[in-house]
Amino acid sequence: MLFNRFSLYQKIVASLFVIFSAVIMMIVSWSQQLEQVSQQQAQQKLHLQLATHLVQDNPLLQQGVYDYDALKNLFHTLMLLGPAFEFYFVDPHGEILTYSAPKGKVKRKKINLAPLLSLIEQNNKLPIYGQDPRNIDKTKIFSVAPVYNHENTKDKTQKNLQGYLYVIIGGEAYDTIFNRIKASETLSVTAMWFIAGFIFLLLFLLALFRYFTQPMQQLVQQLTAIESARFDLTNITLPQWPSNTRNEVHQLGNSINNMVLRIDSQFKQLKQNDSQRRELLTHLSHDLRTPLASLQGYLELLTHAKVTDTPEQKADYLAISLNNTKQLKGLIDQIFELAHLESGHVEVNNERFNLGELIYDCLAKFTLKATQSGVTFNVEPKICDFMISSDIAKLERILSNLIDNALRHTPSGGNIIIKVSNQEHAINLQVCDTGTGINADEINYIFDARYRASNAKGCKKTHGGLGLAICKQLLKLLHSDIEVRSQLGTGTQFEIVLRKNSA
């Protein structure tokens, strides 16, 4: 449709122009009707006694009507003197007996006497309209007076109602001339009203709807600019819409700003994640390549073994190959575990269990390794039978990663202490070591995948480097967090707050 091609501003202006024009026409029509009623009321009130005076002052009517032809001539003479009036004589039943109109002009033979009687009774509710003998459908204002014939009976005069003098005020000739003049005046008045209203409407609506639609135009321009920039807000400044307002456009603008900022944040996060994945793949390819190349090399030595190679040498080759295989498998397992945790499809199975038993079970797994490394384990307090509700498998994985990480960075003769503190609604769990410690500038990055702190550089103990990143993801699932305090050469402390009851 053609109307759909217009902008919202143009549609509103066009619609209200039509409405305003209709209102103007209604006002003009109402004012004309009010003027007409007021004019007729004034004319009827002014000529209210006209018929009475004619009856009292005219001998032909004063003593009663006996000669209808003479009365018709009288009506004709009166009509010449007063062209705005029409004269009719009707009997007591409303039959029209004679009139001043030319032959063929009168369409009615009888009129309703109720309006006549109402006016004779001096009803003040003017104007009162009577039937127009010249028109079947129209009514007119009028003046009326009863006509009596006088009969002398025994020196007494008896009055008998003979009929009514019915005078139409503003007859057909008057209406014709008046309507022509009125049509010309109405046309002028209507034209003046229309032009004035149109100019006022145009100026008012242009200002008013420019004020109303300007925020929407600004919003469209903003969205167009954002779309052209492909939702990149680097070179775009978002307009500040008023807050705490009931203006729907301002509320929409704030919502769009929040949405665009969220989209921009997500885009940046996706770019950052993509960059991190690329960097992760680079590191992982190196870490995977190293044991894989070593494994391939020793397998080739075994395949092309010389006759001079002793069984002991071949056994060493197999041991080294097996160690590289374990290292490769551990790294691949960590990669898959981290990817699974980041996918968001991991379920949490909470259950109540004894935290102390879990701690001692985790330490038991590393007892042999700690003994070989000359590191001792301690639990404070030794008896920590605290019941909590959590996912025991995920918490066991977190503790194992933290203990393994502490064991790698604690030299021979060092200590690893598990501290448990019982609070009102939570339990604080700390894994402390007396190892090499972490540089303060690197603490914020140790949970990033594949980030290796300076204390890990040169470490000969094999590790995948994803343990702390996995701990961070697991703690998010448990609605908990981890804090790190460390000092180079002194040791590191990891602290976890575990709620006693599940969420």
Image: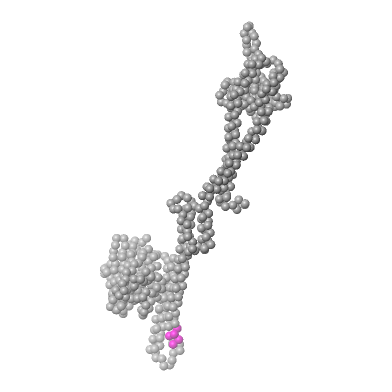
Task: Look at the picture and state if 137 lies above or below 384.
Answer: above
Q: Which of 300 and 4 is in front in this view?
A: 4
Magenta part of the protein: which range?
Answer: 296-301
Asked whether residue 98 appears in the rendered view, the answer is no
Residue 83 against residue 363 in the figure, above or below = above
Q: In which quarter of the image is residue 73?
A: top right
Residue 342 visible in the displayed image: yes
Return the residue nearer the eye: 376 or 147: 147
- Examine the rendered structure and indicate whether residue 153 appears above or below residue 274: above
Q: Quadrant of residue 468?
A: bottom left
Q: Is residue 456 above or below residue 497?
A: below
Tell me residue 492's x, y (percent). Answer: 31, 72
Point 60% across, 31% down: residue: 36
Q: Residue at x 53, y 56 (%)?
A: 220
Residue 194 placement, left or right of 96: left
144 vs 503, left or right, is right
Q: Is residue 283 magenta?
A: no
Say left or right for 179 vs 234: right
Nearer to us in this view, 13 or 92: 13
Magenta part, dominant SS: helix
Image location (x, y in percent) of residue 337 = 42, 71
Residue 437 x %, y % = 32, 73
Q: Which residue lies furthest to the right in this view?
A: 103
> Would you say 495 lies left or right of 18 here?
left
Residue drawn at (33%, 73%) of the image: 438
